[in-house]
Each structure stands twice: as structure tokens, then as C-alpha cells.
Amino acid sequence: MTDKKYENIEIKREGALTFLMLNRPDKRNAMSPGLHADMCDALEALSVDAATRVLIIGGNGPAWCAGQDLKLYFREGAKDPALRRKASNDSHRWRWELLSKFPKPTIAMVHGFAFGGAFTQLCACDFAIVAEDATFGLSEVNWGIIPGGIVSWNLAEMMLPRHALYYAATGEPFDGKRAVELGLANFAVPAKDLRSRTVEFASKLTKLNPNVLRYTKEAVRVVRGMNVEDAKDYLAVKQDSLMRLDKEIGDRVGMTEFLDKKSYRPGLGPYQRGS
Ligand code: ACO
């Protein structure tokens, strides 16, 4: 498959894994209006790309993402309302709507720097694997702005209130190990191992049933905003829908393997069934 070439991002493939890389290394992958438009286009295309089983969001060069481009997004946008409106819409669309609802598992693979607006795509990804020495920061306070877009909401969702307020109010940077403690990342690994550890984890995901994965990620995200009665009802309907969608689940293949054939013990090896 030949992927479209973009000015501000790059698509790389490794088997069933697709790496979607921010590609403005000279500007530390700060998010310009052009980058936002490119990401909207690429995520729309990859969401229906059968070859993509797991999507990894990375960054070329020394940074994962230095946040919104202060010059092209904020300064130029302030002079041109039409540009600002489109950039703002695109920015929200790819970083939240498209990414948080992406139909395959998504992993943020974070190295170098992650600042400000980059927290939205960090939180939109299903998983985050980060370099131990990566630097995270809610630097908005230094620019005289609040963590806007939906960053404050992302923080309130992902972090305990004391931590969210502390880092938002002070702008104090923290490293990858602290990001795990704060609930923003799953694993912190040495920077030199970041790619291999991400590929290792992503490859495990490719061995799980893709429909179950998709329904699970949708369910876990959606029930957060529900009361317990609504969640119970929603999950029952969701499970019913999954049984209809997926023949392996509908036929209860896993139960047959465990109860009758005695060929499969999920408690001993969650990734053993093959895809
Ligand atoms: N917006 C615009 N340009 C940026 C941004 C940004 N957010 N971040 C970096 N750049 C540019 C720099 O202006 C510089 O451009 P130049 O080569 O034309 O001078 C280039 O990227 C390299 O930046 P350096 O600062 O030289 O790189 P260094 O590796 O030393 O530092 C760091 C990287 C720590 C990320 C630093 O650039 C920085 O603090 N950037 C601002 C981060 C920030 O506060 N982001 C939040 C923005 S607000 C928001 O997202 C809502």
C-alpha cells in the first residue's frame, strides 16, 4: 500500500502496526494549522485501513510534541479569524474526536518533550508508553493562558484532582516515571528501548480479537460519564451487539476451548490464542 505523502506528518508501517509520526522536527513537532489538517486527513484514512491493526502516535526528531505552534496557531490565528476557526476545529477533531474514537487500539509513544496541547492526544490514545527521561509540562500558565481546548478536562479525567491542579497551576515539568505515577502513562522505559517496547506491546494487541478490543475500549471510555444503572444497561446492549457482530464471540469459541477442548487457559496466557 502506498500512503499519501503529507507536509507535516509521516506514515510508517511495520506489519500490522502503523506509526503516525508528527513530522516538524525543527519546530519540535509544534502543532501548526497545516499539521492539524494533515492529521484529520490521515486519521480518517487510517480508521478504515484494514492493514492497520494498531495505531502508534509518535514524533520525528527530538520531541514528541511541543504543543500548539505559538507562532502559526496562536499569533497568526489571532490575525485571521477564518484560519483560527479552521485550525481550532481541526485541532479538536483529530486530537479528540478521531483519536479517542479510533476503531483500533492506539498507543502514544512519547519521547523528548510533551507540552500543553499535546496532553489532549496523549489522553485520547488508549495507551501511553513513554521514555523515562521524557519531559512533560503544562506550560500554558507561562503564556498567560489556561489549559484550554479540552486540556483541563483531559487532566480532570486522567489525574487525581490535587495532581491536576498542581501541575496546571505551576507549569512544573515532570518526567516519564512521574507520568506513570500520575496516571498519564502505562509504562516508562529507557529512551533507547522506547520503540522496541512499544512494538512488543502493540504486537500483543494484534493477537487479541479486534472486535472485542474495540468494544472494550469504547465501553470503558463511555461508562465513565454514566451512572451505574445506565452503565449496566449500556454494557448489556453493547455485549449483545458484539455477539452479533463477531462470529467467534457469538459461537463462544473461547468457552469451547476452555471447557470442552481444554486447549486454552486465559488466566495463564492472555495472548496465546492467535488472531
Ligand atoms: N510553538 C512554536 N514554535 C516552537 C514551539 C511551539 N510550541 N516549540 C518549539 N518551537 C520552535 C522554536 O521556536 C525553535 O524555532 P527556531 O529554530 O525557528 O528558533 C524550534 O522550535 C526549536 O526550539 P528550541 O527551543 O530551540 O528547542 P529545544 O530542544 O532547546 O527546546 C522545548 C524544546 C523545551 C520544547 C522548547 O522549544 C519550548 O519550551 N517550547 C515551548 C513549549 C510550550 O510551552 N508549549 C505549549 C504551547 S501552548 C499550548 O500548547 C496550548
Image: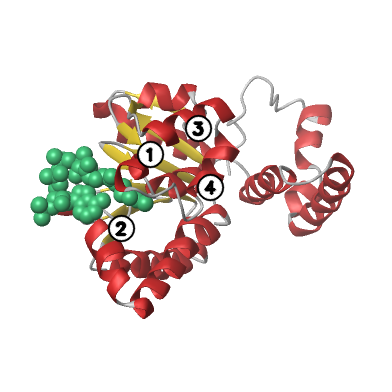
How far apart in space, not on screen, are marks 1 and 2 (Cα)? 15 Å
Q: In the rendering, at what x and y percent does residue 265 appear?
A: 70, 24
Query: Residue tagged by mark 3?
Result: 165
Q: In the rendering, at what x and y percent does residue 94 appear?
A: 46, 62
Q: Secondary structure at mark 1?
A: loop
Q: Secondary structure at mark 4?
A: loop
Q: Secondary structure at mark 2?
A: loop
Q: Secondary structure at mark 3?
A: helix
The answer to which of 91 and 211 lies nearer the viewer is: 91
Q: Residue at x 51, y 63 (%)?
A: 47
- Upstream in sequence: badge 2 or badge 3: 2
Give the amino acid type for the residue marked by disc 2 in the picture: Met
Query: Residue tagged by mark 1?
Result: 138
Mark 2 crowdedness (10 Å alpha carbons): few <14, some 14-19, many ≥20 = many
Colour scheme shown? secondary structure
Query: Which disc is residue 105 wearing?
Result: 4
Query: Which disc is residue 149 wearing?
Result: none
In the drawing, does residue 132 fall left or right of residue 89?
Answer: left
Give the amino acid type for the residue marked by disc 3 in the picture: Leu
Mark 1 crowdedness (10 Å alpha carbons): few <14, some 14-19, many ≥20 = many
In the drawing, does residue 161 fall left or right of residue 265?
Answer: left
Residue 255 seen from this side? yes
Mark 4, mark 1: which one is toward the viewer?
Answer: 1
Query: Which disc is residue 31 wearing?
Result: 2
Give the amino acid type for the residue marked by disc 4 in the picture: Pro
- Upstream in sequence: badge 3 or badge 1: 1
